[in-house]
């Protein structure tokens, strides 16, 4: 008899949703989290005032060099002295990069994973995306279409809460929305001018997972509306932005069916060739080094794209000498992220007598993909969206001329309004972009280090060059002045923190790992619903899609358990 | 009841030839070098320069000034607890060059001249630094430390910037 009905490996964005849906179906679920417990009342630091954090809330420079060179190098904007406990120390959790490549693997190991530190932008994929691989031949065809996942988007969105506006765009289907954060007047002017000059382009409010009109269900979980503090990277005591710690894990816990174990680093899955089932999960305790084994009827891998692939590769057996469910040799391959590094900044005149009240979280505007919507009309495949906004430039930082009263008074003036937009582009699937187990190096718990080998193709380079030109053209059309566009410099792979694709879904077990239910082709009680399943990256922020697929897979697994198949 | 301003003014202490108020309360006080205490990073001469320059850049007006909220102490803490050796050396070098430039501009020891002469010298030096490309031999960065430190204190954040902990609503269009 198994210890649990289901084990969910990982408590982040997708693991939380898997746990919620499985427990709500009445299944006894064990969630294994490799990091320590985060208790909001103890560990959130969002209520600290600026003067309550030392040294401008900056991590000491020597400490960055010693412990956070990769993490800080990737997201300096998010790592502060007060919230550094949300980020891993690179020296404690190292990884390796193939010669000539560089990769940003940016992580948080604790309850809720990166759902605590994410940037909260949420967009649906469309059939433009689900058809993309089939259309241009890169990667393999998705075994699913938009109509298959649409009800699950609805279900997830209703639960998590999204501020946004219905726009009726076929390439970016509308979600279930709570009221959007209204655009500033400068953003409205930008929108009007850009949409007039470029009729195929749209500027819409960013869609963000923040409550602006909390439902009864959300209130029952202790969540309330966003207080517009922009302290999200420090946790949210109002639980206004979605995280698994703020929403899905509490929902799972209230069913009485959730068991959560922290500091449990999964080293492998145990496979029984006779039954062709995964029988359980082997872990090592991060603090005591004790090794334990938990059993369950089904296992959901939600450890994150790179980690889930590594767990499979570490799970070798006579049947699967190259890693569990790796008959196709696709485990660890096709590793994708989004790519940025092109955009523009300019000043908007005419708004000098205006300022804003409140600190709007997570961006202001989104420019959905407009490239190659109706056939191939650009010198690159697929496309990109722009994220950005317009707000008063302000005079913080002291980088303006003047001294004395005039200098102080200048800080009360919001200054000219600045517009900035930056591209998030799709990365093509490429089987040579992959994570493997380092042949010799191991971490302190004896598990192999990840060896990352990812490079961009010409398509990403060409796309970003074109995005840069487009960004300038839009700001020019809007009448901006002082337009600057830095030389295009692609972000490192991994830097957008949207890893995906390492156990792709497909129709053919010979070239894919998972079927349309995120279920392993070869082992029917194994599901993977973090970003690993993605057959292409699209250009939209992917967390919402991970959660929709997690919910769908969880119900499918629950059905199989209910009918005795599993 | 005394106003906050009166409370601040009542707390004036003297340091290094410049006037200073203890900061407005809060954790940063504890973590910064206290007004009147011996600096941990700066020499007395450096502390005097930082105090004088920050007071001229961010003087007390209707709202607290740099000395009222202990910007020199904040910066001393920043250099002691946050800065790497490289940053410390660069900061020290910048202060040295700033002092030399201001002495030249003032025609004598900048720290000994009267307010009018000091203001004039610093204004000219500041204008030149911001008119030119680059970091002004470190001056812009030093000014940045002063400004950021000021606005990170309770007095600078709440009284000068009208920082609100919990806005509670978003208004994208407020007429000034």
Image: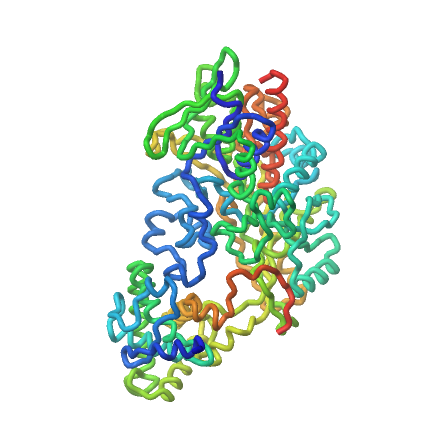
On screen, A277 above or below A382? above
Asked if residue A278 can be seen in this view, the reply is yes
Q: Residue at x 42, y 41 (%)?
A: A100
Front-most of residues A191 and A411: A411
Above or below residue A231? Residue A109 is above
Q: Nearer the viewer, residue A491 or A210?
A: A210
Q: Is residue A187 left or right of residue A269?
A: right
Query: Which x, y percent locates residue A365?
Result: 63, 56
Tell me where residue A433 appears, x and y as whole percent: 50, 35
Q: Quadrant of the C terminus of chain A?
A: top right
Q: Residue furthest top?
A: A274
User: Residue B131 at x, y = what percent?
Assistant: 46, 76
User: From the viewer's perspective, is residue B58 above or below residue A53?
Assistant: below
Number of numbered markers: 0
From the viewer's side, name the closer residue of A499 and A132. Answer: A499
Residue A540 visible? no
x and y percentages locating residue A469 in the rendered image? 62, 56
Between A554 and A74, the one lying in front of the other is A554
> Residue B51 sits in which quadrant?
bottom left
Task: Write down the quadrant of residue B170 in the picture.
Answer: bottom right
- Residue occupying the point 28% across, 84% down: B109
Display coloring: rainbow
Q: Is residue A132 left or right of residue A18?
A: right
């Amino acid at each position: 008899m198994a210890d649990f009905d289901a084990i969910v490996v990982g408590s982040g964005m997708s693991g939380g949703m898997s746990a919620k849906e499985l427990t709500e179906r009445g299944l006894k679920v064990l969630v294994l989290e490799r990091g320590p417990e985060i208790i909001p009342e103890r560990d959130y630091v969002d209520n600290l005032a600026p003067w309550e954090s030392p040294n401008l809330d900056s991590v000491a420079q020597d400490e960055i060099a010693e412990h956070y060179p990769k993490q800080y190098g990737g997201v300096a904007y998010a790592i502060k002295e007060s919230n550094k406990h949300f980020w891993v120390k690179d020296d404690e959790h190292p990884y390796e990069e193939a010669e000539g490549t560089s990769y940003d693997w940016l992580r948080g190991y604790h309850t809720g994973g990166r759902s605590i530190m994410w940037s909260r932008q949420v967009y649906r994929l469309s059939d433009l995306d689900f058809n993309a691989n089939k259309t241009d031949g890169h990667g393999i065809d998705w075994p699913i279409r938009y109509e298959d996942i649409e009800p699950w988007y609805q279900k997830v969105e209703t639960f998590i809460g999204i501020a946004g506006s219905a726009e009726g765009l076929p390439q970016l289907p509308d979600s279930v929305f709570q009221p959007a954060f209204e655009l500033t007047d400068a953003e409205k002017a930008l929108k009007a001018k850009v949409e007039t000059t470029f009729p195929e382009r749209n500027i819409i409010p960013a869609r963000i997972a923040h409550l602006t009109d909390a439902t009864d269900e959300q209130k029952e979980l202790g969540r309330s509306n966003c207080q517009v503090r922009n302290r999200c990277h420090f946790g949210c005591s109002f639980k206004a932005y979605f995280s698994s710690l703020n929403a899905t894990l509490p929902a799972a816990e209230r069913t009485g069916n959730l068991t959560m174990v922290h500091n449990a680093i999964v080293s492998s899955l145990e496979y029984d060739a006779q039954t062709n089932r995964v029988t359980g999960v082997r872990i090592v305790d991060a603090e005591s080094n004790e090794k334990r084994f938990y059993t369950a009827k089904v296992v959901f891998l939600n450890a994150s794209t790179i980690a889930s692939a590594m767990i499979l590769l570490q799970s070798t057996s006579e049947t699967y000498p190259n890693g569990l469910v790796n008959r196709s040799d696709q485990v660890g391959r096709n590793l994708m992220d989004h790519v940025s590094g092109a955009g523009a900044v300019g000043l908007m005149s005419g708004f000098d007598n205006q300022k804003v009240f409140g600190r709007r979280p997570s961006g202001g505007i989104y420019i959905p993909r407009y490239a190659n919507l109706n056939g191939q009309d650009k010198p690159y495949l697929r496309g990109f969206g722009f994220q950005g906004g317009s707000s008063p430039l302000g005079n913080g930082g002291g980088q303006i001329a003047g001294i004395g009263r005039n200098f102080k008074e200048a800080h009360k003036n919001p200054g000219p309004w600045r517009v900035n937009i930056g591209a998030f582009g799709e990365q093509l699937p490429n089987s040579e972009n992959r994570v493997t187990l380092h042949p010799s190096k191991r971490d302190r718990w004896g598990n192999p280090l990840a060896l990352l080998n990812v490079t961009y193709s010409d398509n990403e380079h060409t796309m970003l060059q074109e995005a840069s030109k487009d960004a300038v053209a839009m700001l020019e059309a809007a009448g901006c002045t002082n337009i600057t566009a830095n030389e295009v410099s692609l972000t490192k792979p991994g830097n957008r923190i949207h890893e995906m694709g390492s156990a792709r879904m497909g129709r053919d077990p010979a070239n894919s790992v998972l079927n349309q239910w995120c279920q392993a082709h070869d082992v029917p009680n194994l599901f993977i619903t973090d970003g690993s399943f993605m057959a292409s990256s699209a250009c939209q922020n992917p967390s919402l899609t991970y959660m929709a697929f997690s919910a769908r897979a969880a119900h499918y697994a629950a059905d199989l358990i209910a009918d005795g198949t599993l | 009841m005394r106003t906050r301003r009166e409370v601040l003014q009542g707390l004036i202490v003297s340091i290094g030839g410049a006037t200073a108020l203890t900061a407005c309360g809060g954790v940063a006080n504890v973590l910064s070098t206290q007004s009147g205490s011996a600096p941990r990073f700066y020499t007395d001469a450096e502390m005097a320069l930082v105090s004088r320059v920050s007071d001229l850049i961010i003087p007390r007006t209707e709202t607290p000034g740099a000395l009222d909220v202990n910007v020199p102490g904040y910066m001393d803490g920043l250099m002691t607890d946050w800065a790497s050796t490289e940053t410390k050396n660069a900061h020290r070098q910048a202060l040295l060059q700033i002092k030399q430039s201001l002495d030249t501009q003032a025609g004598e020891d900048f720290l000994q001249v009267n307010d009018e002469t000091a203001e004039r010298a610093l204004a000219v030096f500041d204008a030149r630094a911001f008119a030119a490309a680059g970091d002004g031999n470190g001056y812009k960065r030093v000014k940045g430390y002063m400004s950021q430190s000021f606005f990170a204190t309770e007095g600078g954040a709440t009284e000068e910037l009208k920082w609100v902990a919990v806005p509670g609503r978003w208004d994208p269009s407020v007429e000034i």
